[in-house]
Image (cartoon, rainbow, N blue to C red):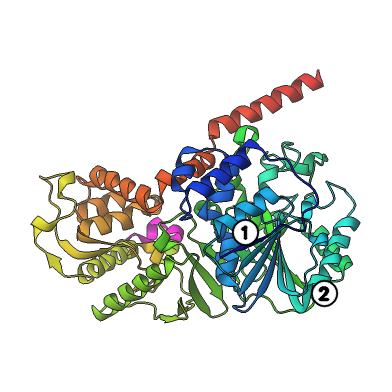
Amino acid sequence: MARLHNKFITTSTPVSQVEQDIDHYITVHPDGVYDEALSTDGRWDVFSHLSDMRQALFGWYDMPKDADVLEIDCGFGALTGVLADHAAHVAAVDASLFRARACAKRWDKKDNIDVYAGRLRDIPFSQRFDAIVLVDVLPRVADGEKSLAPYAAYLQSLLGYLKPQGQLLLAMDNRLGLKFACGARDPYSDELFGELSGNVGGGRLFTKTELIEIFSAAGFRHWKFYYPLPDFRLPQFIFTDTVLPGASIGDALIPYDTTPDTRVLPEAALYADAVRNGLFPAMANSFFVECGMQEDFCPTESASLAFDRAPAYSIATCREGERVIKKPMIDAAAEGLREIANNLETLRQRGLDVVPCELVDGQLVMPRLDAPTMAAWLQTAAPSDRDTALASMERLWAAILQSSAPVPDAANCMKNFDTEADWGVILERAYLNMTPDNIFYETGKLTFFNQGLFRKNCPAKYQMFLAVYDNADALSRIGVLDELKERYGLTLLWDVMDAAQQQNVASFRRYDVYHRFYDWASMSPARMMKNRQILKIIGNEEDE
């Protein structure tokens, strides 16, 4: 069981009402499932401390299995559990006895966690650590001091806690982040536009250049920057200087803001220009940094994080050189990886081309292919590619029919949506990921990957609907959308299947639990326009 050490506490800190409530949720849910609290309590503090989505920050990271980890300012343990899952032992420190006690209570069933209440300098650790974790810590160590010197001095003081090959793992916001240019509030001063206004609150935001200066002044020799999107708190993607995002990353991203009242521009729309002009590393919203005396860093070059899925599909897809590795971000996702491997093998046995893969130490390993996805090809195709697009979709339809044995019409799992409809062929197993996003496309050849989801006794038309629905804009631009609907019998079923899809997505993405997050992600374009108009009016008044 997790052990609490409280003899090093020298000062008491006030406990807010929201902290009391978080502790209550931890107490009444000893199983660690906080879905009820997350679905009913809309406060960001509750969400950030209790949501599994926070674990994505380290769910992809290759921590040595024998690592001893020191976590500074662990709070209520939002990241302590995932660190303990990846390392041999975690020593978690927090200045608040109340939070430290709650953290130990939360992870009571893990026997590789020691929680210390008190300030780090008052705790006489006898060992050195392989990693020291500082998530949103460095900005707050000098109460917003503009000089970089105190921050460098603080990191230098941590060298005494590190093994010679050890590393600092830091996460924090970027002062030049795109979200601040769009009007987001400073996390410490609550100023709109962050510190771009020049005002500093109880914390300090750094640029990439300033962080490098701090690391160098602290005596560190090597560092590696990662760029979590949309930020380090709830990351959905991880990029590095080796693999930067494409210009279309804004289409896949779900930016969010818990206080969107000051937003004046849609953040996602700005990524294309930032990427094309080589500005992304300087303007990423936040940083995750490895910093050490030796250049022995995690091999991950980029990662896609399934942060909001059902537990079995909380999977990180990581690019490491010539390999792609799918990793379980939580223990329950191990079953999801086995399902993907089994589904791909079934499709291979039925004569379809699939990416070869192998389960190794609980991770799904496959080669990296340089081919574009079918979805990427459709996005760049022109009306002159009309015949090629139709032929490719016909090959996909043939693959869908080949992927599973048919069953009697009476078994149709969707028949209750419309009892009179012509549902066509009903498949014993309908693989819902047989869509262009999960197909490599080479001169017409289709190679399938990432086949995790399936429904039993489902119409093949529904699979084709998903393929067309997900790429409707591209297919419409090419000029084949309506023809595809007619060719595969989707026109009359389109609205019915759309309704069914919304139900499936709501369940798969756990809208019942994470609806607060999707509320924060629904930043109103009308409100942004109104905010721009207000700024214009204020500017005109000042000119008069």
Left or right of 258 on screen, residue 159 = right
Using the image, tell me which numbered label, if any, was put on residue 304: none
Residue 273: image x %, image y %? 64, 52
- Pointer 2 residue: 221
Residue 121: image x %, image y %? 83, 61
> What secondary structure predominates along the stretch shown in magenta?
helix
Three-letter code for the amino acid on which mark 1 is drawn: Pro
SS of the residue under disc 2: loop
Binning the other alpha carbons within 10 Å of mark 1 as few (below 14), some (14 to 19) or many (20 upward) gives many
- Image quadrant where residue 429 sits: bottom left
Quarter of the picture holding the C terminus: top right
Q: Is residue 215 above or below residue 199?
A: below
Residue 379: image x %, image y %? 44, 58
Q: Which residues are magenta?
A: 379-386
- Pointer 1 residue: 228
How far, Cα to Cα, is label 1 from label 2? Answer: 23 Å
**Sequence order check, earlier mark of 1 and 2:** 2
Asked if marks 1 and 2 touch (Cβ < 8 Å), the reply is no
